[in-house]
Amino acid sequence: HKWQRALALLWQADAQSSQLTVAHWSSVLSACGKGSKWLLAAELLLTALPAGSVTPTVVTFNSMINACSRASCWEQAVAWFHHLRYASLQPSAITYNSLMSACGRSGHWQRALQLLKEMVTEAVQPSVVTFE
């Protein structure tokens, strides 16, 4: 499993006192999401944030939103979207696409349409993926 390998590499780097960057964390979160381990990804990020191990970026939150989307956990995806906003970060097209996908997969198409309207209002350029 790629998520296990990514996690092992993260812990190995940490044990060797290597400087872990937000890119390292985001990669592990993404691998966990692809492995349907969204809850593990959430635990990792929630542990890293208070410890000051990582200052999340839009990519970090996108990894979490996508992990939740893959698991059809739309409410958790929305919660991570709110965390992104609380961190004063601007959502990207990828953010909106992942969130709309989470809502669509869970049968909440009205919420997905609201997000599309918000995306346009926020001047975030939709992509081809937005309309898939």
Image: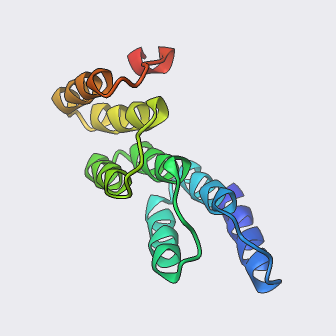
Q: Is residue 37 above or below residue 65?
A: below
- Looking at the image, the residue that sits furthest to the right is 16
Identify the residue at horizontal 35%, vertical 45% (top origin). Answer: 72
The residue sitting at 49% across, 14% down in the picture is 128
Give the colouring mode of the picture: rainbow
As rendered, which of 123 and 27 lies closer to the eye? 123
Q: Residue at x 57, y 48 (%)?
A: 34
> Is residue 89 found left or right of 24 in the rendered image?
left
Vertical order, 86 against 71 (above or below): below
Quadrant where the image shows the C terminus = top left
| Residue 108 relative to residue 54: left or right | left
* Position of residue 129 measured from the top left corner of the image (x, y, whole percent): 48, 20
Q: Is residue 8 visible?
A: yes
Residue 102 % position (x, y): 34, 39
Residue 115 image position (x, y, % from top left): 26, 30
Q: Is residue 42 left or right of residue 30?
A: left
Q: Nearer the viewer, residue 66 or 51?
A: 51
Q: Give residue 90's quadrant in the image.
A: top left
Residue 1 seen in the figure? no
Q: Quadrant of residue 2?
A: bottom right
Left or right: 11 as drawn, with respect to 43:
right
| Label tally | 0
In the depicted structure, whether residue 49 falls above or below residue 30: below
x and y, in percent, of residue 111 in the image: 19, 32
Image quadrant containing the N terminus: bottom right
